[in-house]
Image: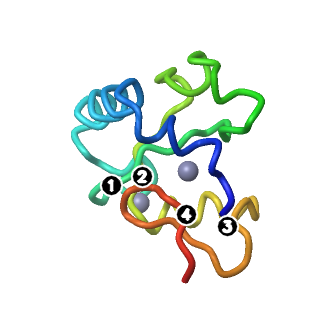
Amino acid sequence: MAKDYAKSFYNGKAWKDTQAAYMASQCYVCERCGGMARIVHHMKYITPQNIHDPNITLSWDNLKALCIDCHNAEHMGKSAIAEGLRFNEYGELVRV
Ligand SMILES: [Zn+2]
Ligand SMILES: [Zn+2]
């Protein structure tokens, strides 16, 4: 499946700690619609080239707290998600 390179990053402690701290700093509020945030989104998408660059992957400047709908919209708007895929509540790509 796609995005295998990102799996160890998303499952790693560094990301989990950063994500939890960022979510808490935003009080779990979606930065787009004010709803309940569930996902910390990377504004600059993670790629195989920057996956080991903490200035991209772990920088709060590059993060956004989003609810599921807004997260899907962010990615769909830029068509970063292949057809038939969407993000689940953990921010993982799953088949629809
Ligand atoms: Zn939202
Ligand atoms: Zn995202």
Give amino acid for label 1: Arg
Asked whether mark 2 lies closer than 8 Å to ligand 1, one says yes
Q: The residue under label 2 is which amino acid type?
A: Leu
Q: Is mark 4 within 8 Å of ligand 2?
A: no
Q: Earlier in the sequence, mark 4 or mark 3?
A: 3
Ligand 1 - quadrant of the structure image = bottom left
* Marks 1,2: beta carbons within 8 A: yes
- Tell which circle, 1 or 2, labels the residue nearer the N-terminal end: 1
Q: Secondary structure at mark 1?
A: loop
Mark 1 or 4: in front is 4
Mark 1 and 4 residues: CB-CB less than 8 Å, in contact? no
For marks 1 and 4, give the CA distance: 14 Å
Residue named by callout 1: 38
In the rendered view, does 89 fall on the left or right side of 29?
Answer: right
Secondary structure, mark 2, is strand
The label shown at residue 76 is 3
User: Which residue position holds label 4?
Assistant: 93
Q: Which residue is mark 2?
A: 66
Q: Earlier in the sequence, mark 3 or mark 2?
A: 2
Q: Earlier in the sequence, mark 1 or mark 4?
A: 1
Is residue 34 found left or right of 77 in the rendered image?
A: left
Secondary structure type for disc 4: strand
- Residue 83 lies, in percent from the top left, at 72, 78
